[in-house]
Image (cartoon, rainbow, N blue to C red):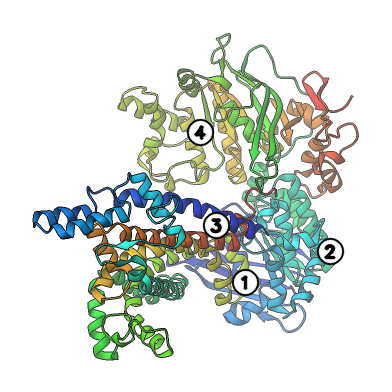
Amino acid sequence: MVILRYAIYRFITMLLTLLVVSVLVFAIINLPPGDYLSNQIAELQASGQSAGVAKAEFLRKEYALDRPLWQQYMIWMGFLPGPHGFSGLIQGNFGWSFEFDRPVSEIVGESLWLTVLVNLAAVLFVYLVALPLGVLAAARSRTWVDYSSAFIGYLGLATPNFLLALIMFYYGHKLFDLPIGGLMDPGFEGLPMSWEKAKSILLHLIVPTFVIGTSGASAMMQRLRANMLDELGKPYVETAIAKGMSPTRMLTKYPLRVAFNPFVADIGNLLPSMVSGSVLVSVVLGLQTIGPSLLTALKTQDLFLSGFILMFVALLTLVGTMISDVLLVLLDPRIRYEGRET
Amino acid sequence: MTPLLSVDDLSIGFGGAEPVVKNVSFSVAQGETLALVGESGSGKTISCRAVLRILPRTARITSGRVTLGGTGAPLVLSELNERKLRDIRGDRVSMIFQEPMRSLSPLHRIGNQVSEVLWLHSGASERDAKRQVLQQFERVGFPDPERAYRSYPFELSGGMRQRAMIAMAMVAKPDLLIADEPTTALDVTTQAQVLGLIKELQRETGMALILVTHDLGVVANMAEQVVVMHKGRVMEAGSAAAILKAPAHPYTQQLFNAAPEIPDRDTVGLPMPQDDLILEMNKVSKTYTMRAGSGWKPAIKIHACRGVDLKLARGKTLAIVGESGSGKTTAARIALGAELPDPGSEILFRAQPGAEPIAVHNMSRAERTRFQRQAQMVFQDPYSSLSPRMRVQDAMTEPLEIHRIGTRTEQRGKAEEMLCRVGLNPDMLKRYPHAFSGGQRQRLSVARAMMLDPTLIVCDEPTSALDVSVQEQILTLLEELQERLGLSYLFISHDLAVVARIADEVAVMRQGLVVEQAPPDTLFYNPKHPYTKALIAAQPEPDIDRPINLKLVAQGAGSPEKWDDAFRFTEQVIPSLVELEPGHKVRCHV
């Protein structure tokens, strides 16, 4: 019951935070002088194409860009009626991308889910690789296992992601016949999900997951090793040995359990750092995630598109921290009972 | 009779260095208690851990044979492989460790951790194991075994955790229990009860016990056989009666002389003079507010100090004694101005006789600086109260720098003078703290506190982290300094025996209240309050004919609601301090 109440409480605070974030996002994308349309109008006027100017002026009105900033914000969020009544983010209308001349939802549509997919796969990869390696390195500290895992780890940390991407592509294709670039066979693009399409996506995922996850995994491995070494010196480990537990069982039940908490707390940080870290990689690998669109949108001051993507990343982060907070409460009784009389 | 466990010619070393345990042999018979006695660094802990080979990774057993007898063929533990040794650990030979606070995993329920022993060794089902564990919990004195089974370690007090550890060690009915300083981290009253429990359990099950301790008092209460160790060697071994009555080896005698004891008094002491007070605490209260589990319940208030009145005369020592959580440290922190008391409390400090007092509870910045030059503190743990990254010289001259006193050469000169005064060599100024032993570090702490030539020093358990013989030296040092410089001490301790030596007046605290206050002689000659009596009774004495009176301990150390009518107090009704004879106050209903 405690947990359910806590989860609800965390959800409400998350919504409030999201509201604050939306104000910040809107303020930040409006910081540079002018907007996409005023830039375009200036450009058109300079080249004397007055027909385009009329269209741009029309769009300005259509999207309420001629109103004061706070009203623009309220209309964008859907708290105030715009030229076409209530139609903002909370009503599910993500706005219009001027750069691509299409609704935002259409542009990001599929790539939104692919972004989530790529990053979840990378997070999974990070945990799957870092956990066993970190524990092993701690349990066999100062042996060749420890040293070689540390070496590989530092190599992973030190190699720039995009470089790693290029190398992986070359050798992945040459040795294992892995596909190059994209997240699926071009033939499947725009088609509804099918078994064949899913298979193609999975095959294409291998390289990006590895590339995006490597540095995160090596960082986490090193921290896990350090944490584990700390825990291994604690008296409760001795107690467990004195009980007659086998080393493997003892390691996973006691010290790992304690050393693991910081990693649960990390989920929230991992997601956004991967999304932003994967932008460049996505460009290099030609992944259809929202990374490349974000880059273009920011460059051209495409208000609604960049606003929506930033909000989406913020949402990912907040959901991540919420999940890790709730998980921590589930995992650690000391947090759960904080403040309770003992 | 063949011994249950025998250790022959055991030597252990770290790397290539000189071995820390040299040719040690001992044995223990069925149902018998063997005490391994020695100071820190004597190798007693590492020898007993070698039995189950629970050693630091760099330790190497270079020689020795460990044999476990008992029913069936004798097993040579020192030759068993890791896999087979695992079956012995926790099943036939189990261990209890020193720190109950940290020896249980904080993230697993007590029931789970204890039942695990049965799951591992007898392959018991969850239900079966739980039944047995609950029985064991009841046996070791948990009032509500079901609740304890569901609890996490941090929900229990230190004494209860140690009971859980005992239950864990006993649940598989081992032939031998190895207890490594099982009560050192506990209050005296709790120590007495835990020792009593171990002894009772031993009588019931007939197991053998190896008790590692530095306290001869504990030995006298528990052991039949004693092995005295020093610097990795056995100094003396034999029956407890023989060794305790007539220690043959000079080292054993030395240990004996150092053991603090509550003296027998045949008369009351003189009350502390009241005409020249350096520190006066009037009606000092401190309430902490703890956030409740949910926003709907009111916050919990904890009364750390309730109307404490204390007066310290110039050049004298006032001791505050009590168990952990009694409010003694809070009182000391308030006296130093490190914590603000509740409104209505008053603390007055007079630097010189007749000087205008500083109101410590309400100091201005300038007053605080002035006060800090006069009042200093010596902390409990000499290992963590000195920064490992500062040279002794820097640590010592820092107070002078803060108060901008003297040039660098003068500061250095002062530091040298202080080192000499506490019995250290001025050459040591360039070293880092890690180069010093516990006793030397505590001397350094004293020297640092003396750097500003204070008149009042607050000593917060300055000896409880030290070995007995070192403890003795530090107390002597404090006494000397007091005599020479006319210092006044506010001395915090949980140990009546230490206090007996140094204090001019003792205030016994329980649950934030002073329950009895008297000069030590009066207190030991004529203790009135049941809690004071329990404290005195719980002090283990190195005399085999005077065991701890557990009944007295249990009565006084229990909840205040169970004290005799005359002393009982509840949240609503608190009796006042009554002066029975000059200088002897007791909190009771008249």
> What SS does tag 3 mark?
helix
Q: Residues within 10 Å of mark 1 (few under 14, many from 20)?
A: many
Same subunit under labels 2 and 4? yes
Instruction: Name which residue type carries label 4.
Output: Val
Q: Chain of mark 3?
A: A
The answer to whether B355 is drawn above or below residue B294 in the figure is above
In this view of the protein, which residue sits in the foreground, B525 or B588? B588
Instruction: Name which residue type carries label 3.
Output: Phe
In this view of the protein, which residue sits in the foreground, B459 or B149? B149
- Can the viewer see residue B246? no
In this view of the protein, which residue sits in the foreground, A51 or B323? A51
Q: Which residue is mark 4?
A: B446
Disc on the earlier residue, 2 or 4 = 2
Q: Which residue is mark 2?
A: B203
Q: Which residue is mark 1?
A: B52
Instruction: Answer left or right for B63 relative to A46.
Output: right
**Quarter of the image that includes the C terminus of chain B:** top right
Q: Residues within 10 Å of mark 2 (few under 14, many from 20)?
A: few
Per the model, the C-alpha gap separating discs 4 and 3 is 54 Å
Judged by depth in the image, the label closer to the viewer, 3 or 2, is: 3
Residue name at image x 32 percent, y 74 percent:
A152
> What SS does tag 1 mark?
helix
Instruction: Answer left or right for B580 relative to A144.
Output: right
Per the model, the C-alpha gap separating discs 2 and 4 is 46 Å
Residue name at image x 32 percent, y 44 percent:
A68
Q: Which residue is mark 3?
A: A11
Q: Chain of mark 1?
A: B
Q: Quadrant of residue B275?
A: top right
